[in-house]
Amino acid sequence: MSDPKVKKAKKHNILLIAGAALTLAVLLFTFVGAFYTPRDPDAMNAAEKLLPPTLNHLFGTDKFGRDIFSRVMKGTLSTVSTALLTVLAGGGVGILAGAVTGYFGGKADAVLTRLGDTVTAFPAVLTALLVVSLLGPGGWQVAIALAVAFIPSFMRVSRVSFAGQRRLPYVISARLQGASHAGVMLRHILPNTLPSLLPALTIGFSNAVLAEAGMSYLGIGVTPPDASLGYMLSEAQGMLALAPWYAVSCGAVLLAAVLGVGLLGEGLKDA
Amino acid sequence: MLKRALAFLLAALLLTLAACGKHEGGKEPDAGADAGRAGENSLVIGVAQDLDESLDPHYAVAAGTREVMFNVFEGLLKPDRNGNLVPAIAESVNVEENGTVVKITLRSGVKFHNGATVTMRDVLYSLDRVRGADGKEALLPALTAIDTVETPSDAELVLRLAEAQPELTSYLTFAIIPADYTEQATKPVGTGPYRFVERVVLERVVLERFDDYWGEKASIERVTFRVIENAEGLLLGLQSGALDLVNHLTVTQAASVDKTKFDLEEGTMNLVQALYLNNAVKPFDDVRVRQALCYGVDRNEILSLAFDGRGTLLGSSMYPAFTKYFDDSLTNYYTYDPAKAKELLAEAGYPDGFEMKITVPSNYQPHMDTAEVLVQLLGKIGVKAKIEPVEWSVWVDRVYTKRDFESTVIGVDASSMTARAMLERFVSDYGKNFINYKNDEYDRLFAEAQNTFDDAQQTAVYKKMERNLTENAASLYIQDLADMVAVRKGLTGLRFYPVYVLDVAALSWDAQ
Amino acid sequence: MLEIKDLRIRFYTRERDAVGGINLTVNDGEILGLVGESGSGKTVTAMAIGGLLDRAACDVSGQILLDGTDLLTLDSARFRKVRGKTLGVVFQDPSAALDPLMKAGRQAEEALLIHTSMTKKERKAAVLQAFAAVELRDPERVYDSYPHELSGGMQQRVMIAAALVTDPSLILLDEPTTALDAGVQAEILALLKRLNAEKRISMLLISHDLSVVRRACRRVAVMQRGRIVEEGEAEALFSSPAHPYTKRLLEAIPLSRLRR
């Protein structure tokens, strides 16, 4: 177990800094987009179709004359919030399930682990597709669908950690002081599990962003005319010759989000 | 650790690249040499939607199926590019005795694709099948008007009607198929200039020139209809050389087509595209709400935003190519008047608007685009619309068959060149009245039209029916879409028909 | 006061009893030493007292009466109320028994957090007092330190303080000095003796090392193969052992060489 507070010489953790910077930039972009966009993202204008980037329209306009910059802001908001929801829901349930099964073991553990394996056998997008087919398309439906698909991976990380720690002396010591199972899991095991959970959460977030974009691209996520990075990318694809800036701007923002969080996760692991 | 970072970078880059280079269904359209195809006298046409599950011509639902199979099947009569009906399997058709008798002489020596000769037996079999005389449902209800069928000789057919039907001959375009053949659904056999070779669901249909065709033989030997249910895939197919012809292109797609390799032809699709409203569902059961939508949506905006200004506005369920029946005065019956729209909505009990769902087949980009613009325009009068994209098969099942929808954007065509085909759809007890239109006056007019023997009078009644649809805002009629076709240079003969068909027999490669 | 009556424990997977019917009493204010080698059943006995036995894996009969309450009859919820409050436990390896991510003071407080409704300030005061009682030189600094910042001896004192802080009826110590250096061992044992004398807290000290037991305990019980073979005043036992096994224990050093 690494010493969390050893007074080493502070290394310059490039990954952490780069990751944090990029993530922060994307989050800022998202946050601002929640309250303000330079133009109405849904306003159509026949006279301004497929314009290249100008001062008026930083990312140009799409086939209906809508401002791409504003739509990218809204789309990023949608993607990021969906991914956050996915990680919170999937992570929350998964970590809890893994904690309980890892700590207590027994039949419940065997059953839940098998269940998790079954879900993992399907590619995440397929599982999500199944759930969406039951719930219908839309933002929060995608979040739930992806959360379900991601639960097993969180469960696995948490289970290993909790199972490994439950026999450690300090856990028994806490039990001997009268701590309940829940108390032990919450106060002692969970904090000791965080170092392995954090990378899982950040990777989960990146994957959720990509998955949501993928699903919107396929048309089963956020539906038009609501802005969503994935759907916009699928539209942009058909116009690469006419309007390459469309694909580039959507792709760049998506790239920034995934890369930023990914680097952050890597950086945190070494911190 | 740096390796991980690079992996992330690569993954993200790949995503962006994937957006650039993705091919539909993971299958690469085979970039065959286009010069090679001209040399081989073959052709690959891209179609945006798979054909019906069953290729049986009498059961075809999708306009796309009829479009392709037009080359495989023929009726006693068939349409020419001007909309006239010309004899095909019949050599002559004569209407006598004030329209109560139809005398048909069969052409001799017409062969089916399986080598058999067409006989009266096959004609009777096909006729009985479509008019429901075999005990099953009448597939062409119009033909139930036939009282008796006589065959004075092997080549003569006499149809006697209880009452004169001026339009009956228009329905003689139903496919003539072999009497004892049971595999039409999977291996269709007809008499047309092309015969069916093979079909792979969701992938392709292959036809070959029928060298024993009774009429002028086709030029191109082998035609493959490649199913690519994805707009970008169709374009990529053109650009990569895998496809030679794609029709029904959207304006945006047409703009991206390489003009050095392709010619762009513009026709009309001969459809009535509308925001079809389910009259049996709240709030569309209230005529005021339907009218409000008609007043509140500026259809010119749809054309300019989604179609580059191309397309022909419509006011009712009839398109301009039907010159005899088209009533242009209905086109702008509802002028753009958002104030009046809001007034009507308030009157109907929706002063703050309402929410609605628009179900759209996701593979039809024009309808998806129209829906997207509609959401915007409807928003201006306080109506919050949400788009529900569905697969084509789901659309057919849920919207068209089960009528489980609120509103939808689709193009409706005429299966035969008759006003009846466009208007019978909305008779209240018609089997495919998917919008649940219920209007007693309309039903009465339709019955009247069926009993009017004078052509001019019947036309007038049909026009009244059109007016009925408009005045009652049965749906929000939008336009007849411009049909953009990309044709590889060197391929000539493309002709636009007033019905939704693609005549391949007329196409040929220029001499190399 | 702890009374063990006819305690019999047999694991389903073994042929003989791990504990074959023992009787043991720790009187109020007494330190009793329980000696035996590995496999003697002393650890199992300790686990039984601490409620750590997997009841599904063994057969238990007899009574363990702590202040009159039979611990063996308590369900887990009620046992939790006893553990850490009336019964304190000190482990063998303090560096493993302390959560590396939690400050020492916070860990010593944990029993108070669980069993009482004292405020944070009150808890801290109680812990500082306990730290002083276990002769930690700078209680405030120890309170704010992480376990790895403390020496082995300090860690064990923290453990003892943690057990003390709820004013328990009995403290069970399982090999409390085995992991410590010889010098520190002596200090801890002296501390225990002193605490027992001053605060009259009953202690059950379990060890395989006779010399440890001799230094801290007044009375001693010797266990061999699940049975108590000899019991009596420490000095008497060591000067003139009655049972041959006790004799062997005294003679052979290190004991681990004795094969059973």
Image: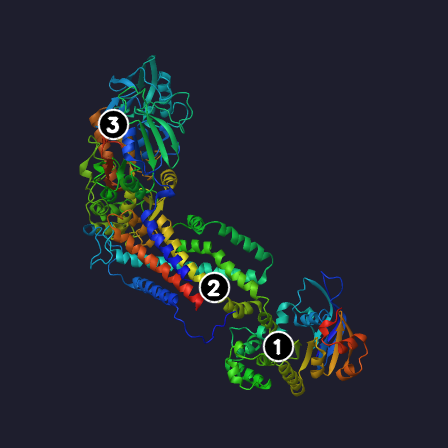
Q: Assign a secondary structure to mark 2.
A: helix
Label 1 is placed on what type of residue?
Lys
Vertical arrangement, residue C131 with respect to residue A186, above or below: below
Q: Is residue A116 visible?
A: yes
Q: CA distance from mark 2 to mark 1?
A: 34 Å
Which residue is disc 1 drawn over? Answer: C85
Q: CA distance from mark 2 to mark 3?
A: 67 Å
Label 3 is placed on what type of residue?
Ala
Residue A49 spot, x, y in % from top left: 21, 50
Vertical arrangement, residue B16 with respect to residue C176, above or below: above
Task: Give neighbour class at mark 3: few <14, some 14-19, many 20+ (Cα, 10 Å).
Answer: some
Q: Assign a secondary structure to mark 1.
A: loop
For the residues beneath circles 2 and 1, the answer to whether they share a chain is no
Q: Chain of mark 3?
A: B
Single out the mark in the foreground, 2 or 1.
2
Pick whichever, B22 or B424, lies toward us.
B22
The disc placed on residue B506 is 3
Task: Give neighbour class at mark 2: few <14, some 14-19, many 20+ (Cα, 10 Å).
Answer: many
Q: Quadrant of the N terminus of chain B?
A: bottom left
For the point 68% across and 62% down, the residue is: C57
Single out the mark in the foreground, 1 or 3.
3
* Residue B131 shown left or right of residue C191 in the figure: left
Pick whichever, B396 or B402, lies toward us.
B396
For the residues beneath circles 1 and 3, the answer to whether they share a chain is no
Pick whichever, C75 or B267, lies toward us.
B267
Q: Chain of mark 2?
A: A
Which residue is disc 2 drawn over? Answer: A197
Q: Chain of mark 1?
A: C
Residue B214 spot, x, y in % from top left: 29, 19
Residue B363 spot, x, y in % from top left: 33, 42
